[in-house]
Image (cartoon, coloured by chain):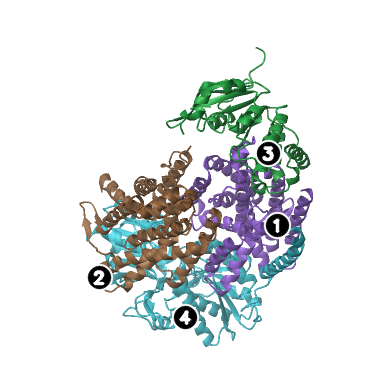
Chain colours: A green, B purple, C brown, D cyan
């Protein structure tokens, strides 16, 4: 096959002492997908995407991104290759203005691609990003003073500013109101036109609206994978959600 | 942003010009002490790059100040090097020291980083005592008369002359402020700030945080070393005390008093603290008591230091 | 003298140093562990303990032992009280912000040091040990009081262990250390716990000082060394780990004593300092850090 | 702060801030009028004394200050110098090289003193003395340091009140080798002060046909000493010790514990126990041991009238303690240097008919030519001879033995025993 796989993991493992958070995951992701990862609490979803982004070091196995083995690369190098990660717990520069939060990301992208990093250029690009996520009117506000939903948007905006190949969203709609959630879904759809999206999500409505395919993790392993319909019908998945999964 | 930067630039240049002009109006004594305050202000400015902007608290920065002092003073004393050569050499050696120490120290974070820098500085201090036959140990060495004046680019520079020393200090301060200004206003400033505020996030935005910290550490250590070299050359004495812990603490105090993360803060802190001690010691030898009370008061009512508070409340554009 | 006795003496000396260090460092470790603040004035609490011991011992009539025992009780209480007041007046108001606390405690350091200089003076003053007996070994003589210091430190550590693990107060402290927010949610008076921990930490430093003054003298500048050493011990041992602190104190006390057998003393200090530094580099969270996810 | 009211607040507070700034600036820039700037030149002789009031030298500083005040009072009561009273300005130098230099600069430029005297610790002197020379102020140290006679400073630096450490130490060697033994173990602090002893005494012993067989340097921060004692060569005749700082009582006590009753002869420099009461139980081990003393702390049977006069003026009793507090022990073997320095200044100024800075050169030449200063009320420690080349005065030294917790002089050296070839000639340098 001429095309390389966009993202692939082989027998990926991550153990903390005796806890097998991720225990042998083989996973593939094609370019342009919106993929959701679901699973009960403690299934290893967050650890799994942390392994992809490089925040956590794998105990064993491999991660391959665009044909390159990135397993041993530090996180920042993976970001430079196009893997962007947004945090589950909002992780922004709370004391900085909103626009500065995005500007930091923009500067990273520009300087890593060897482009000019003049103050004016960075600001212009940052403004564009803010407009896309709908935060333009808050540009000069302290990020920490934003409403929670807006902080989540800013978090996504920072990922977006990197213009990633792969955007990993870790429970992006947690704590958002219904109207915010639907706006958010529209935003993700728009982003998906230029980027592949990997989404950890508890809100099944969001998952069903957005995801093309769904991967179900349970106890560190892949339990099932398929289209939303397949997953809905899958017996094993229902069991996992209906109480067998401990923690 | 642009306008703010302009204002900030003008303010800093104005301060430098003011410092230059002051020599024509202030007393002889003020010239002498202000010279010393500026050199120590440079030291604290170097410290501030690391602490104020990048958020890394080193408790051992005297090791770089001391490295500068000795790398400049020893070749002059033992080999009769010319002053400019020794000065450049000292800056280079501080740079090398900063890179090596940085590579080691930056393997640790927060509390461990603090203690590790403290320990390394202590080892350096003890090494000066250990090699006392060369360094003069705690007693130190008085620079030879011959090094008190030198020819440079056709000019004869007399270091025993107060005005000459003052202007050299202003020049070095100007270089420090301008270099720092360019650094902080540029992309490294943004990066340093980002690391200070949220290191994990910064790494996940594609920055090589470790390299950036090492860069900051190196710049910081080199500036501190330059200050040390200037001290040795201008005041003609080198001694182990300059590598001791009280100088590491002093850099921290100057910075915190003046305002961490402001370019002029460390200088302001140096001037205020030294003046305070000087004036208080005229009326009481208990000046450390007052100093202690002032420090406590500062943390209670001016937690960001003087310029830091001014910046936060009134002048957000201040660099 | 043969090498064996030499090493034996160095080990004894190392143990005495470790004993005093361990008490001082456990105090710092408690403060560091529970309150997460760096108390730069800790060494001054140590010094204050020594100076108060001198005041008590010289003003107590009768046998030196009575003065010593009185000092052992009064000095830690007095120093603890000073620390308690400092915490109430300053640290609580700073909300225990780490940087502000460093500066404020540096301020406190100056205040204590200068106050002692003005009242007690610049002299080094001795306190009579409770007993004078010298044990004569075949190779050298050794002070029985020093052996008493080692024993006393062991007993005190036992008491500390008991308080921490077996009493309500210990439970409160450990709960606060484990998770401040949860502790608050469970109605633990965190502020009060903090003030008491700060006082107890200072009191422990004072006990260490009372034990040491019959060996070395009370002097207003004596606080710096214990401060640096305690810091080192606490970090090497791993933040908030009392066992780690004890282990590190013994390690550092002994290595300092024994290294000086092999190297010239200043070189020995350099080597042991660098050794500690390297432990930090390769074990950044200390030797006894709890595994973190 | 909202936009509406913001402006007003801004202005108000900015004004306040500016006011503060202005106040701060004027504080920094104002010449220190205060107490001392007011007197006009030619009315008084201004002498600046940077004293170790705080820092590691504080125990010495306290007594230096008392001696200086006592001497100035006597001079002023007697009509001052050339009809002008001395105005004594004292400031703390923190026993710190940086602060010490700052204070010297302040005396030179702000108070515009006629001379500076009184610094003791050698690291402070090493930093401050050259700066005084560059500011062209006569600088008289009361330090014992050999740096001056070694040629480290300038023509403005003098030490007229006390013999330098090289001479003190060298003059001890003949007596030690003759009376105590030829094989010496030396225990000394591992820093500058100790190196003088290490180098000078080793050389002087060699000249006497003896040797310093073992050197035991102890780091300055050390608080416990037992573990160093096994290094003492058991075949030594003499243990030579010199310890400074707060650790000395521990040192002696542990030495006693280590050795018990049989031990080599012990010889030390009294620096170890300056400001320390010999009658302390911890020091009982020193009984019968020997000490160098410059001035005998305990009034001797043959006490001179001069010593009596000096003790009374300063307020020191026959045991070397303060007359108002018998627990307050003086630094008797060093502090006389302040006294003698002040009288040397007086006599040189009188010789130069000094009225003000115009006669500075004459004053310096007069200091160089002080020549022999006989034992007198002005020189209670004994006769001194000023060397015009090295700017160093040489005097007699005493060896005392501890008897019943007091020191009895057993031998007094001649000045010649401590003389050495000049290493520098300051008098030929320009002013």
Mark 2 chain: C
Q: Where does the image place residue D67, in percent across and percent down from the top left?
A: 47, 77
Q: SS class of the residue under badge 2?
A: loop
User: How many other residues sit within 10 Å of disc 2, few (<14), some (14-19) or many (≥20)?
Assistant: few
Q: In this rendering, would D226 be left or right of D262?
A: right
Query: Same chain for the residues at labels 4 and 1, yes or no?
Result: no
Q: SS class of the residue under badge 4?
A: loop
Whether residue D270 appears in this view of the structure is no
Whether residue C44 appears in this view of the structure is yes
| Whole-number angstrom distance, CA of label 2 to CA of label 4 | 47 Å
At 46% from the left and 73% from the top, the residue drawn is D62
Q: Decide: marks 4, 3 in contact (CB < 8 A)?
A: no
Disc sitting over residue B170 in the figure: 1
Q: Is residue B125 above or below residue D144?
A: above
Q: Quadrant of residue D34?
A: bottom right
- Where is mark 2, residue-wise? C63
- In depth, the one of D280 and D267 nearer the eye is D280
| Whole-number angstrom distance, CA of label 4 to CA of label 3 | 94 Å
- Where is mark 3, residue-wise? A180
Mark 1 chain: B
Nearer the viewer's eye, disc 3 or disc 2? Answer: 3
Q: Is residue A220 above or below residue C2?
A: above
Q: Decide: marks 3, 2 in contact (CB < 8 A)?
A: no
| Whole-number angstrom distance, CA of label 2 to CA of label 1 | 65 Å
| Whole-number angstrom distance, CA of label 1 to CA of label 3 | 57 Å
- Where is mark 4, residue-wise? D378
Mark 3 chain: A
Most extreme residue toward the top is: A1
At 40% from the left and 64% from the top, the residue drawn is C79
Nearer the viewer's eye, disc 2 or disc 1? Answer: 2
């Amino acid at each position: 096959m001429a095309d390389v796989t966009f993202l692939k993991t082989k027998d990926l493992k991550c153990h903390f002492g005796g806890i097998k958070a991720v225990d042998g995951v083989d996973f593939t992701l094609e370019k342009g997908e919106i993929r959701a990862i679901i699973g009960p609490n403690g299934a290893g979803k967050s650890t799994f995407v942390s392994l992809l982004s490089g925040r956590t070091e794998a105990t064993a196995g491999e991660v391959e991104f665009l044909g390159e083995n990135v397993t041993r690369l530090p996180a920042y190098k993976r970001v430079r290759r196009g893997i962007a990660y947004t945090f589950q717990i909002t992780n922004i520069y709370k004391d900085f203005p909103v626009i500065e939060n995005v500007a930091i990301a923009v500067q990273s992208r520009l300087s890593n691609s060897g482009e000019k990093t003049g103050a004016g250029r960075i600001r212009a690009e940052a403004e564009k990003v803010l407009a896309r996520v709908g935060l333009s009117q808050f540009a000069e506000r302290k990020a920490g003073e934003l409403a929670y939903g807006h902080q989540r948007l800013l978090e996504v905006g920072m990922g977006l500013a990197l213009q990633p190949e792969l955007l990993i969203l870790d429970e992006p709609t947690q704590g958002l109101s219904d109207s915010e959630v639907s706006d958010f879904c529209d935003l993700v759809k728009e982003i998906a036109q230029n980027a592949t999206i990997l989404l950890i999500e508890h809100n099944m409505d969001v998952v069903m609206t957005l995801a093309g395919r769904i991967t179900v993790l349970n106890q560190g392993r892949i339990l099932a994978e398929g289209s939303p319909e397949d997953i809905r019908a899958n017996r094993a998945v229902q069991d996992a959600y209906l109480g067998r999964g401990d923690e | 942003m642009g306008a703010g930067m302009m204002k900030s630039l003008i303010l800093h240049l104005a301060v430098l010009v003011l410092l230059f002009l002051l020599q024509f109006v202030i007393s002889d004594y003020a010239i002498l002490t202000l010279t010393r305050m500026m050199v120590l202000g440079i030291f604290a400015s170097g410290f501030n790059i690391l602490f104020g902007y990048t958020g890394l608290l080193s408790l051992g920065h005297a090791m770089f100040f001391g490295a500068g002092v000795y790398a400049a003073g020893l070749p002059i004393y033992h080999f009769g090097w010319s002053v400019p050569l020794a000065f450049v050499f000292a800056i280079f050696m501080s740079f090398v020291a900063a890179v090596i120490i940085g590579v080691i120290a930056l393997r640790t974070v927060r509390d461990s980083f603090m203690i590790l820098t403290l320990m390394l500085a202590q080892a350096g201090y003890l090494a000066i005592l250990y090699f006392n036959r060369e360094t003069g140990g705690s007693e130190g060495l008085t620079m030879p008369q011959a090094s008190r004046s030198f020819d440079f680019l056709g000019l004869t520079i007399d270091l025993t002359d107060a005005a000459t020393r003052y202007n050299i200090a202003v020049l070095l301060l100007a270089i420090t402020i301008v270099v720092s200004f360019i650094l902080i206003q540029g992309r490294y400033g943004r990066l340093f700030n980002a690391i200070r505020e949220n290191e994990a996030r910064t790494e996940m935005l594609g920055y090589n945080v470790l390299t950036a910290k090492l860069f900051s550490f190196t710049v910081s250590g080199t500036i501190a070393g330059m200050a040390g070299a200037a001290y040795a050359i201008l005041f003609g004495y080198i001694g182990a005390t300059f590598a001791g812990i009280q100088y590491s603490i002093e850099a921290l105090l100057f910075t915190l008093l003046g305002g961490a993360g402001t370019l002029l803060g460390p200088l302001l802190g140096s001037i205020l603290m030294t003046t305070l001690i000087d004036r208080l010691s005229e009326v009481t030898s208990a000046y450390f008591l007052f100093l202690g009370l002032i420090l406590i008061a500062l943390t209670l009512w001016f937690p960001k230091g003087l310029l830091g508070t001014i910046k936060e409340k009134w002048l957000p554009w201040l660099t | 003298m043969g090498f064996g006795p030499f090493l034996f003496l160095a080990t004894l000396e190392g143990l005495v140093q470790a004993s005093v260090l361990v008490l001082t460092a456990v105090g710092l470790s408690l403060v560091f562990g529970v309150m997460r603040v760096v108390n730069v004035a800790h060494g001054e609490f140590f010094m204050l303990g020594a100076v108060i011991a001198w005041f008590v011992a010289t003003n107590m009539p009768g046998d030196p032992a009575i003065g010593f025992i009185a000092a052992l009780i009064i000095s830690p209480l007095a120093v603890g009280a000073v620390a308690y007041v400092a915490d109430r007046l300053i640290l609580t108001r700073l909300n225990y912000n780490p940087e502000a606390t460093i500066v404020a405690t540096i301020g406190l350091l100056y205040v204590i040091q200068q106050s002692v200089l003005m009242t007690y003076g610049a002299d080094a003053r001795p306190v009579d040990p409770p007993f004078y007996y010298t044990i004569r070994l075949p190779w050298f003589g050794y002070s029985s009081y020093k052996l008493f210091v080692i024993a006393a430190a062991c007993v005190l550590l036992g008491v500390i262990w008991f308080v921490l693990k077996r009493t309500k107060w210990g439970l409160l402290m450990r709960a606060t250390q484990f998770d401040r927010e949860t502790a608050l949610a469970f109605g633990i008076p965190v502020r009060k716990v903090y003030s008491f921990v700060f006082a107890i930490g200072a009191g422990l430093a004072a006990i260490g000082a009372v034990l040491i003054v019959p060996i070395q003298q009370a002097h207003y500048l004596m606080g710096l060394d214990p401060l640096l050493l305690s810091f080192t011990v606490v970090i090497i041992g791993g933040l908030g780990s009392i066992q780690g602190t004890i282990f590190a104190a013994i390690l550092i006390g002994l290595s300092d004593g024994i290294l000086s057998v092999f190297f010239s003393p200043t070189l020995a200090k350099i080597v042991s300092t660098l050794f500690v530094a390297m432990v930090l580099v390769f074990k950044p969270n200390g030797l006894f850090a709890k595994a973190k996810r | 702060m909202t936009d509406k009211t913001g402006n007003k607040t801004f202005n108000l507070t900015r004004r306040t801030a500016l006011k503060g700034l202005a106040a701060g600036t004027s504080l920094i820039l104002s010449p220190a009028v205060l107490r001392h700037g007011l007197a006009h030149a030619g009315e008084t002789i201004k002498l600046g004394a940077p004293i170790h009031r705080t820092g590691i030298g504080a125990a010495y500083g306290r007594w230096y200050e008392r001696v200086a005040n006592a001497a100035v009072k006597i001079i002023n009561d007697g009509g001052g110098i050339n009809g002008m009273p001395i105005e004594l300005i004292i400031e703390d130098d923190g026993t710190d090289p940086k602060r010490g230099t700052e204070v010297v600069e302040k005396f030179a430029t702000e108070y515009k003193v006629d001379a500076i005297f009184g610094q003791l610790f050698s690291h402070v002197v090493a930093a401050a003395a050259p700066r005084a020379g560059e500011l062209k102020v006569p600088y008289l140290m009361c330090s014992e340091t050999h740096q001056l006679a070694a040629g480290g400073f300038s023509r403005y630096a003098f030490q007229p009140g006390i013999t330098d450490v090289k001479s003190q130490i060298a003059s001890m060697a003949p007596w030690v080798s003759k009376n105590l033994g030829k094989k010496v173990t030396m225990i000394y602090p591992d820093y500058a002060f100790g190196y003088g002893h290490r180098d000078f005494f080793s050389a002087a012993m060699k000249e006497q046909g003896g040797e310093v067989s073992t050197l035991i340097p102890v780091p300055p921060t050390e608080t416990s000493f037992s573990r160093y004692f096994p290094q003492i060569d058991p075949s030594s005749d003499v243990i030579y010790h010199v310890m400074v700082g707060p650790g000395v009582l521990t040192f002696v006590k542990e030495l006693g514990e280590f050795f018990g009753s049989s031990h080599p002869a012990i010889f030390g420099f009294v620096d170890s126990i300056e400001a320390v009461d010999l009658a302390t139980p911890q020091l009982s081990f020193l009984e019968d041991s020997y000490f160098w003393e410059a001035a005998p702390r305990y009034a001797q049977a043959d006490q001179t009238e001069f010593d009596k006069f000096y003790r009374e003026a300063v307020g020191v009793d026959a045991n070397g303690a303060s007359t108002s507090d018998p627990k307050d022990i003086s630094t008797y073997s060093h502090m006389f240097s302040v006294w003698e320095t002040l009288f040397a200044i007086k006599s040189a100024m009188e010789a130069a008919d000094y009225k003000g800075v115009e006669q500075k050169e004459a004053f310096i030449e007069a200091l160089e030519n002080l020549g022999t200063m006989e034992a007198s009320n002005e020189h209670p420690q004994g006769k001194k001879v000023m060397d015009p080349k090295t700017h160093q005065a040489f005097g007699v030294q005493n060896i005392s033995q501890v008897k019943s917790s007091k020191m009895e002089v057993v031998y007094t050296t001649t000045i010649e025993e401590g003389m050495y070839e000049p290493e520098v000639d300051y008098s030929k340098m320009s002013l």
